[in-house]
Image (spheres, rainbow, N blue to C red):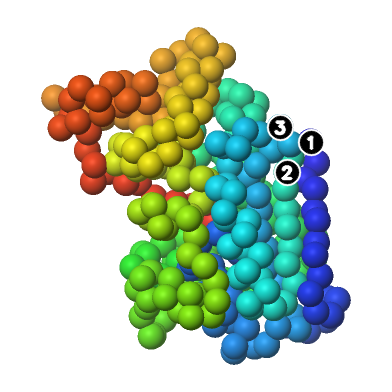
C-alpha cells in the first residue's frame, strides 16, 4: 500500500530557500518546538509534518486519541506555516500482522512503517538537505538521544530547540499553550506522560498499561483483544509486556495484567511507564 500524502497549505508554496520542517505530533513538545522555530524564522517556509497511525477501518480505541486531532488543529492555527498530514492507510496491528512480529519495547515496527518511513519519504521528495533543517520536540532531559537522531536523519541537519536554554518543564509548556488559547490534550489531563497512540503503546510499560486500564478500560480491552488475536495469528505466546522473575525474562500478557490489577495489584510495577520514541529511534 502506498503512502497517502494530504497537504493542507497555510502560507506560500515551497520555494528554493531555507525550509524548516517540524516533526509534528500530539505532544506538547512538538508544539513548543514549532513555536520557537516560527518565532525565530517566521512561518513562510515552516512545515508541520504529522504522521497519523489510524488506519481506514481502525477502531476508535486504536491509534491516536480523538482529542489529539483537536489539539493539533488548535496548535497549527496558533503556529501558522504549512500543515502536512500523512496517513499510510493502516494501523499498528496491520503492520504487526504483515511483519509477523508483535511490537514491544525492544522493537516497534509500527514506528518505522507508520511514522519514520512515510515522513522520510515526504522529506526526501520535497526537501533538499542543503536548504532544510529538521526539528524534533525532545527536551533537555533527552539530550542523550541527540547523537542517534542526528545520525538517523543524515544528510539533513537536525535541531531540537527544547534541548537548549531556556530549559522548560512539560508543565510550563502546557501552561504556555493554555495561555495561547490551546486546551490541554485529554491524555495529559488523565495523567499520561505522552499524548500519542491514545495512551497505549508497544513501548509502554506495566505502569502505563495499568493506568490505561484504570482510566480508559474500553481502550485497554481493545489492546488486550488485539494481543490475543496476534497470539492466535502467529500461534506463539507473544506479548507486548515482559517481566523478570528470578533473573529470567518472561512474557506478561495484558490479560494477566488485568487479573493482577483485580487480585494482586502489588505485583504490578506502576513505575514502569516506558517511553515514546517514534522519531528518535533508528
Q: Which-is-in-front pick, marks 3 and 2? A: 3
Judging depth in this view, the residue of 270 and 240 nearest the camera is 270
Q: Label 1: few (<14), some or many (≥20) within 10 Å? A: few
From the viewer's perspective, is residue 93 above or below residue 89?
A: above
Q: Residue at x 52, y 12 (%)?
A: 232
Residue sitting nearer the eye, 255 or 238:
255
Q: Quadrant of the N terminus?
A: top right
**Distance from Cα at disc 1 to Cα at disc 3:** 14 Å
Residue 1, labelled with which disc?
A: 1
**Whole-percent x, y for residue 78 in the image:** 63, 77
Q: Which residue is mark 3?
A: 57
Would you call the spot at circle 3 few (<14 residues within 10 Å), some (14-19), or many (20 or more)? few
Q: How many numbered discs sit on the rendered protein?
A: 3
User: Badge 2: few (under 14), some or many (20 or more) residues near its Cα, within 10 Å?
Assistant: many
State yes or no: discs 1 and 2 in contact (Cβ < 8 Å): yes
**Residue 242 placement (x, y as % from top left):** 31, 29
Residue at image mark 2: 88
Distance from the alpha carbon under mark 3 to that under mark 2: 12 Å
Amino acid at each position: 500500500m502506498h503512502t497517502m500524502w494530504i497537504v493542507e497549505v497555510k502560507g506560500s508554496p515551497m520555494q528554493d530557500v531555507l525550509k524548516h520542517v517540524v516533526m509534528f505530533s500530539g505532544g506538547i513538545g512538538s508544539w513548543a518546538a514549532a513555536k520557537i522555530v516560527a518565532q525565530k524564522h517566521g512561518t513562510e517556509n515552516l512545515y508541520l509534518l504529522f504522521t497519523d497511525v489510524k488506519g481506514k477501518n481502525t477502531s476508535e480505541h486504536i491509534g491516536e486519541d480523538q482529542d489529539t486531532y483537536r489539539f493539533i488543529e488548535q496548535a497549527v492555527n496558533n503556529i501558522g506555516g504549512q500543515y502536512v498530514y500523512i496517513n499510510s492507510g493502516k494501523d499498528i496491528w496491520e503492520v504487526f500482522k504483515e511483519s509477523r512480529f508483535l511490537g514491544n519495547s525492544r522493537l516497534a515496527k509500527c514506528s518505522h512503517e507508520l511514522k519514520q518511513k512515510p515522513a522520510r519519504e515526504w522529506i526526501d521528495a520535497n526537501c533538499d538537505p542543503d536548504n532544510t533543517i529538521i526539528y524534533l520536540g525532545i527536551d533537555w532531559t533527552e539530550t542523550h538521544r541527540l547523537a542517534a537522531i542526528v545520525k538517523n536523519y543524515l544528510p539533513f541537519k537536525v535541531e531540537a530547540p527544547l534541548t537548549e536554554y531556556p530549559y522548560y518543564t512539560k508543565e510550563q509548556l502546557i501552561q504556555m499553550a493554555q495561555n495561547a488559547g490551546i486546551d490541554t490534550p485529554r491524555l495529559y489531563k488523565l495523567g499520561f506522560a505522552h499524548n500519542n497512540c491514545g495512551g497505549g503503546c508497544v513501548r509502554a510499560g506495566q505502569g502505563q498499561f495499568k493506568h490505561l486500564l484504570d482510566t480508559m478500560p474500553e481502550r485497554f480491552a481493545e489492546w488486550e483483544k488485539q494481543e490475543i488475536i496476534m497470539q492466535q495469528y502467529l500461534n506463539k505466546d507473544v506479548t507486548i509486556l515482559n517481566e523478570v522473575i528470578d533473573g529470567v525474562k518472561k512474557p506478561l500478557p495484558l490479560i494477566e495484567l488485568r487479573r493482577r490489577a483485580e487480585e494482586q495489584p502489588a505485583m504490578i510495577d506502576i513505575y514502569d511507564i516506558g517511553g515514546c520514541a517514534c522519531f528518535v529511534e533508528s
